[in-house]
Amino acid sequence: MSSSRYTFGRDSLQTVSELVEIVRHEFEKLQSPSRGIELCEWLAHWFERLEDHVQAGSWYETAGELILAQFGTSPSAAAVSALPEYEKALECYERAGVGDDSERCSRILLELRHLFAST
């Protein structure tokens, strides 16, 4: 994790890991799944710009999980919608050289593609 510090709020300085925990806490309060997905994508984008590819991948993966968890969506439609998020997560994990996360994401992508192909 980077030791860089960022301004959050008025006067407090937080490390990236502290900011992530604050955002996760606020994220859990969200009631709208679509708003949660947008927030995850936004966070992932900014972590990519900060070149923190592990955090970016984690947020893309969370967006994929939220898409898959939406009620009222058929499994194949959810799989198609979640694929881009997991593909981005895999790219981030590969850039970061994180083997375990890359392998897990690859398995999820295979399952999603299989689910879509079988419908």
Image (tube, grey):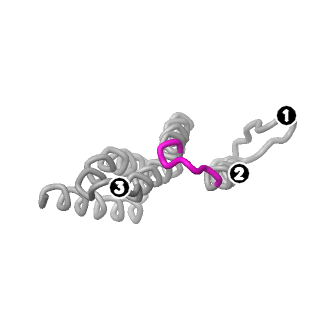
* Mark identifier at residue 34: none
Return the residue at label 2: 22
The residue positioned farthest toward the right in the image shown? 11
Q: Report if residue 27 lies within the magenta region.
A: no
Q: CA distance from mark 3 to mark 1?
A: 41 Å
Q: Residue at position x 67%, y 47% from top?
A: 16
Q: CA distance from mark 1 to mark 2?
A: 15 Å
Three-letter amino acid code of the residue under disc 1: Arg
Q: Are marks 3 and 2 in contact (CB under 8 Å)?
A: no
Q: Secondary structure at mark 1?
A: loop
Q: Quadrant of residue 100?
A: bottom left
Three-letter amino acid code of the residue under disc 3: Gly
Q: Of marks 3 and 2, which one's residue comes earlier in the chain?
A: 2
Query: In the depicted view, which residue is nearer to us: 83 or 74?
Result: 74
Return the residue at label 1: 10
Three-letter amino acid code of the residue under disc 2: Ile
Q: From the viewer's perspective, is the residue at label 3 or at label 2 nearer?
A: 3
Return the residue at label 3: 72
Classify mark 2: residues with Cα within 10 Å, few (<14), some (14-19) or many (20+). few
* Position in image of residue 17 (x %, y %): 67, 53
Classify mark 3: residues with Cα within 10 Å, few (<14), some (14-19) or many (20+). few
Horizontal side of 15 relative to 11 (left or right) equals left
